[in-house]
């Protein structure tokens, strides 16, 4: 499935119905061949052994025992995108290259979709620090050209919307807890029984669909956090937010046949009770 695949809605010139935002998230795994070639060029390590060794070294250096390798060694195995209209309602959602989830095709679909919706703003959580440079390197790897991105979307203030930067005052403070905290703060599921560090193990076990379900849930959380942030900026009221969230739930419930895992996700929606 492609990001630029037409929706089922009839054609219209109504400005409110045009795609204004693309909300996305990605999941990655280490590229063992690259890790071996760059970090251990003379040791003839297998990809699996190279990753294991690099992860052990990362744990030793990490303040929180994280074994996650830098984005330069990662390849995407899941990208989910939600198309959002100018009136902030949901238009469509997709997990790229389903059900095969091939990295090369995932990257091609993403960047071709970005070119197709070149006027839309990209919305991410830590996209400028992770997802976008990851996908730029992947385009470099595969030899893809997407000049619209380099001309329009790399400007910090007029390009994409990175919610990590928004809530962190552009690096002035650390958003401890990340997207998970922000989602749970407003009653969204956030992280449940899967975390980012589980993705590589799941990939080795062939759980590609489960990885994409997890990615989709993070993408929906990002969309709702984005909506809530628009109250802060004065673009919508709390009442409008409540209405948009209710419409989003109806939209997602209608997609359960296509995305069965949504049922479990929607069962965890609530409203956070402030003290």
Image: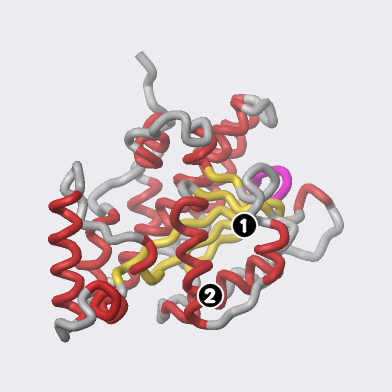
Asked which quadrant contains residue 99, the reply is bottom left
Residue 169 seen by the camera: yes
Tell me what residue is drawn at x 66 percent, y 42 percent. 157
Tell me what residue is drawn at x 29 percent, y 70 percent. 30
SS at badge 2: helix
Q: Which residue is mark 2?
A: 139
Percent across and percent down for residue 230 are 62, 33
Nearer the observer, 198 or 30: 30
In the rendered structure, find residue 83 and report the number of the disc placed on it: 1
User: Magenta residues?
Assistant: 83-89
Report the mark closest to the observer, 2 or 1. Answer: 2
SS at badge 1: strand
Residue 270 seen by the camera: no
Q: Is residue 274 above or below residue 230?
A: above
Q: Is residue 123 left or right of residue 58?
A: right
Asked which quadrant contains residue 227, the reply is top right
């Amino acid at each position: 499935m492609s990001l630029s695949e037409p929706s089922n809605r009839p054609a219209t010139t109504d400005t409110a119905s045009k795609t204004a935002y693309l909300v996305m998230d990605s999941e990655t795994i280490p590229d063992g061949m690259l890790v071996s070639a760059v970090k251990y060029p003379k040791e003839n390590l297998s990809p699996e052994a190279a990753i294991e060794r690099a992860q052990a070294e990362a744990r030793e250096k990490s303040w929180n025992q994280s074994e996650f390798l830098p984005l330069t060694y990662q390849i995407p195995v899941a990208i989910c995108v939600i198309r959002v209209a100018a009136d902030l309602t949901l238009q469509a959602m997709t997990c790229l290259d389903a059900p095969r989830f091939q990295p090369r095709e995932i990257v091609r679909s993403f960047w071709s979709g970005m070119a197709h919706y070149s006027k839309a703003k990209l919305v991410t959580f830590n996209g400028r620090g992770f997802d976008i440079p990851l996908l730029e390197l992947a385009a470099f790897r595969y030899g893809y050209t997407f000049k619209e991105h380099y001309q329009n979307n790399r400007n910090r203030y007029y390009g994409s919307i990175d919610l990590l930067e928004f809530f962190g005052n552009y690096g002035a403070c650390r958003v401890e807890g990340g997207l998970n905290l922000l989602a749970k703060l407003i009653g969204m599921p956030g992280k449940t029984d899967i975390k980012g560090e589980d993705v590589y193990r799941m990939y080795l076990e062939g759980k590609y669909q489960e990885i994409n379900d997890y990615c989709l849930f993070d993408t929906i959380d990002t969309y709702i956090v984005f909506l809530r942030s628009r109250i802060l900026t004065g673009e919508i009221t709390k009442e409008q937010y409540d209405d948009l969230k209710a419409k989003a739930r109806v939209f997602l419930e209608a997609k359960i046949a296509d995305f069965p895992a949504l049922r479990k996700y929607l069962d965890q929606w609530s409203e956070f009770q402030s003290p």
